[in-house]
Image: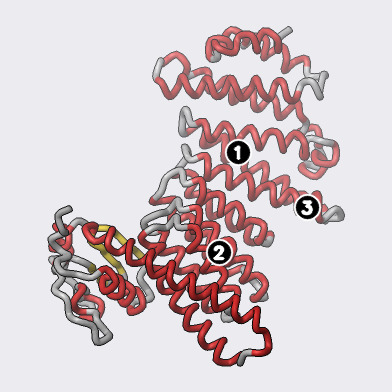
Amino acid sequence: MEEDSCFLGGNDMDLLSQFEDILEGDKLIDEIGFLHPSQFSLLDEVPSDSPPTLNTPIHLSETNTANRVQLQYGKTIFWNKNHKLGICTNVLSHLYIAARHAYMDVSRRYKASINVSSNRGAVCSAAPRADFDHLLENEILKHTKALLILSCNFGSAWNLRRLVLLRRHEISFFLDELRFSALVFSYAPKCEYAWSQRRWVIKMLEKKLQSLDEHISEESALVEKIAEKSKMNYRAWSHRCWLISFMKRAQVLHELDKLKQWAELHVADNCCFHYRRELLLKILEDNYSQCVEASTDSKFDICCLWKEELKWTELLIRRYIGREALWIHRRFLAQCWITHFTTNEGAIMLDPEDPLSSSTEIFLAKELQLLKCCFDILADGFDDTQDQAQYAACYFLWIFKFVLPQEPKHEQIIKEVREMKPILQKACPWNNLCCKNLFK
């Protein structure tokens, strides 16, 4: 194999040492990229007024801190400026081999040291053994950091980091782990191991801190930032849903309010609306399960919140045509509205003077108006309008089947729906059998 032009006469372990020196020297690195050698010259041309320590690209021969032999490497190995790190793609294989070898060696020595300590017990001196283990643990954190940057799905390396952190009691180590996993997300935003590591660290912090409110808010903001760059990132949104269990009521309401603007700009992203549904369910569960004796004012606030969510979703459906995520979200809202807020108690809470205004019949009548509005634009023949009509028809066929078997008194609604049977069958030709069964 032809040797890489930027790695002539080099040693893999020296290359790894240089890489680890950079990571240790700039602990604020927040973004990593893998660059072709031809791209380094373009980066150096960018002017900057920052101090030389952050401005000057760090090349491999400039970072030696020990009395090692100065090797002649090319000028396009590493680039470090303003807490951004670029790594040449030509040396990735060399770095990975060296990092894996260093990891396997220190892992073997560390596990052997733990076994010796557990076997000897009180016979051996505790202080020297603890100092030796700490040195090995620092070496493990250093080597696994380099290895996981090069191969973020190296599961055993993540597990060994957990073992080390469990033996350390300083909160700073856990906060550093959060920063490190965030660094991995800069180039691998869907790395399941890194997301799992963050959840583990948060659980550890829960035992050490009195309040996680600030960390939960930062986590939610991180997911939103990653979601902007990585569309339909199910792992990131699942992580955000997991965070809800740590949120207090005020945080949940803040998340709902803050997420509205983001959702309006990403109406096709079902992950975002799924997160809203989890937030709404959290509010319902806290009031109807955990807080059985919740105040009337609290229940009234939830009713109003749901009503506003229905209005907002209807506005988005009318504004953004043919977005299936909006119809899925409305189906959830409709089911919860009928289940929780159209009962006698729920209707009285919404409007004590006229509880019938919140009845199922009134709700279905309003939904029928939305359905007719969606069918009015069916004739233009565009794909989005066709999709809108299909989603609307499927939604109403669902709500027709879900509600009317429970409420057999809505003769007027049934009559109006029967009159729309030809339109429904045209919008959903594959559901003709379903339509026939429903209209019997």
Whether residue 306 is visible, yes or no, is yes
Mark 2: which amino acid? Ser
Image height check: is 214 above or below 267? below
Give the x, y percent position of residue 3: 15, 58
Residue at image location 58% in from the left, 79% down from the top: 168
Whether residue 51 is visible, yes or no, is no
Gap between marks 2 and 1 measured at Cα: 27 Å
Image height check: is 315 above or below 427? below
Residue at image location 62% in from the left, 42% down from the top: 309
Gap between marks 3 and 2 measured at Cα: 22 Å
Query: Is mark 3 in CB contact (under 8 Å) with mark 2?
Result: no
Q: Is the residue marked by circle 3 packed among few (<14), some (14-19), or many (20+) residues within 10 Å? A: some
Mark 2 sits on what residue?
217
- The residue nearer to you, when weighing 308 against 398, is 398
Judged from the image, the secondary structure of the residue bearing numbered disc 2 is: helix
Q: Total of numbered circles in the picture?
A: 3
Q: Is the residue marked by circle 2 packed among few (<14), some (14-19), or many (20+) residues within 10 Å? A: some
Q: Is residue 23 left or right of residue 233?
A: left
Mark 1 sits on what residue?
311
Mark 3 sits on what residue?
287
Image height check: is 379 above or below 76? above
Mark 3: which amino acid? Asn
